[in-house]
Image: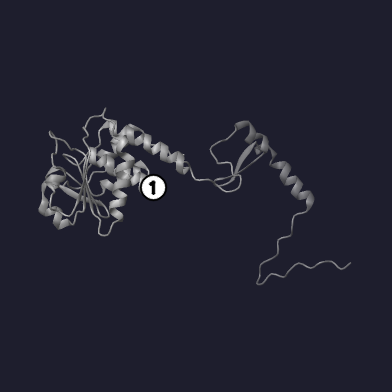
Amino acid sequence: MAEALLPQLEGDAEATPCPSVLELEELLRAGKASCSRVDEVWPNLFIGDAMNSLQKQDLRRPKIHGAVRASPYQPPTLASLQRLLWVRRATMLNHINEVWPNLFLGDAYAARDKSQLIQLGITHVVNVAAGKFQVDTGAKFYHGMPLEYYGIEADDNPFFDLSVYFLPVAQYIRTALNTPRGRVLVHCAMGVSRSATLVLAFLMICENMTLVEAIQTVQAHRDICPNSGFLRQLQVLDNRLGRETGRL
C-alpha cells in the first residue's frame, strides 16, 4: 500500500512531526499528578467525572429536560407591595388623572366639578365614598347631566371588606368602557385608597394584570396608597386569579 503523503507547507516553515502513540501515552502519564475529580482546563471550562457531580449534588445549574419553563409567578408580600407604593411614586397628584384609556381616578373635588366632568366627557361615575357623611353626591347631584352614577358606601378602614365589590364594579367599568364614547371616573374622598383599590381590581380582573402590574400601571399616572386591609384583599384576588390563569 502506498504511504500517505503529508501536505507540503509553504515558505520556509518546517512541518512538525506528529507525536507517536508511545509519546502521547508518556505525556498523559507525566500529567497524572495534577488529575482530580474536577479540573479547570480552560478559563471557566471544567472537566470532571460523573461521581463528583453526584456526590456534590450541584443544584446551581438547572436540570434541562426538554423545553425550559419560565419561573412561576411569585405573589408579592404585603411589605413588598407597600414598598412598591412608596418607591414608584408619580411626579404629581392632581384632582383627577387618566390612569387607563378612558378610565379616570379622582377625588371628591373632581367628582363635584360638573364643568370639568362635561369637558372630559365623563359618562359614568363610580363613587366609592357614597353616603351622607362622606362624598354625598348621588344621582340627584348629576341630574340633567348625560352620565350614569354608581354609589358604594365604603369606609377607608383596613377592616372594611371592599372585596365584595371587586367583581361587580369591574364588570360595571368594563360595560361602561365598551359603550360608545364611554369614559369612567372612579373616585372616593382623596382618590388614593378606596377608589384606587377598585381600579386595581378592574385591571386585574378585566385586563389580566397581576397585582404588581396593575399598581405599576396606575402609579405611572397617579400616586395611590390603598390601606393595608385593601392590599391584603387584593392579594387574595391576585392569588385566585393566578390559580385560575395558571400563573401559580
Q: Amino acid at mark 1?
A: Asn
Q: Examine the rendering and report whether any part of residue 247 can be seen.
A: no
Q: Nearer the viewer, residue 206 or 142?
A: 142
Q: Nearer the viewer, residue 96 or 53?
A: 96
Examine the rendered structure and indicate whether residue 8 appears above or below residue 128: below
Q: Is residue 59 left or right of residue 235?
A: right
Mark 1 falls on what kind of element?
Answer: loop
Asked which quadrant contains residue 17, the reply is bottom right
Where is mark 1, residue-wise? 208
Residue 54 coordinates in the image, percent (x, y):
64, 34
Residue 68 coordinates in the image, percent (x, y):
55, 47
Q: Residue furthest bottom?
A: 11
What color scheme is it? one colour
Residue 57 coordinates in the image, percent (x, y):
60, 33
Asked which quadrant contains residue 129, the reply is top left
Examine the rendered structure and indicate whether residue 132 appears above or below residue 28: above
Residue 47 coordinates in the image, percent (x, y):
63, 43
At horizontal 27% and vertical 39% (from top left) the residue drawn is: 197
Image quadrant occupied by the N terminus? bottom right
At horizontal 78% and vertical 53% (from top left) the residue drawn is: 20
Q: Is residue 136 left or right of residue 174?
A: left
